[in-house]
Amino acid sequence: METLLKILEKFDITEIFKSKGKLKKWSAKRSIGGVLVTTAVADMSKNGINEYNLSLSLIGVLPLCLSFFEAN
């Protein structure tokens, strides 16, 4: 476990959201939403469906649904 923590300390997660030339940067809107929905689904499989899981899922999916209405 300690070796895993040492490895994770070397990674700067904020770097993946920054632009690197012609490479596309990660979208925080989609990444954070994905983490929220993944967490909610994992908790649903363990503890069943409750209002907290449903609200986490709604918060995670709402920005993706609203992104369809953005102008190019």
Image: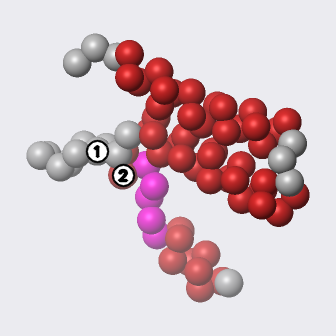
Q: Is residue 70 left or right of residue 38?
A: left
Q: Is residue 59 left or right of residue 18?
A: right
Q: Is residue 18 above or below residue 63?
A: below
Residue at image coords 36%, 52%? 16
Residue that mark 2 sits on: 16
Residue that mark 1 sits on: 25
Residue at image coords 69%, 53%? 41
* Mark 2 and mark 1: Cα distance apart in space: 7 Å
Q: Give the quadrant of the N terminus.
A: bottom right
Residue 70 quadrant: top left
Q: Is residue 4 above or below residue 59?
A: below
How packed mark 2 is, by other alpha carbons closer than 10 Å (few <14, some 14-19, many 20 or more), is some
Residue 12 quadrant: bottom left
Q: Secondary structure at mark 1?
A: loop
Residue at image coords 55%, 40%? 33
Specify the amino acid type for callout 2. Ile
Give the magenta part as a residue range: 10-14
* 58 is within the stretch colored magenta: no
Q: Give the quadrant of the C terminus.
A: top left
x, y percentage for residue 57?
67, 39
Find out whether the residues at labels 2 and 1 contact each other: C-beta distance under 8 Å.
yes
x, y percentage for residue 14?
43, 49
Say which label, 2 or 1, has the lower sequence index: 2
Magenta: main secondary structure equals loop
x, y percentage for residue 25?
28, 45
Q: Is residue 45 above or below residue 26?
A: below
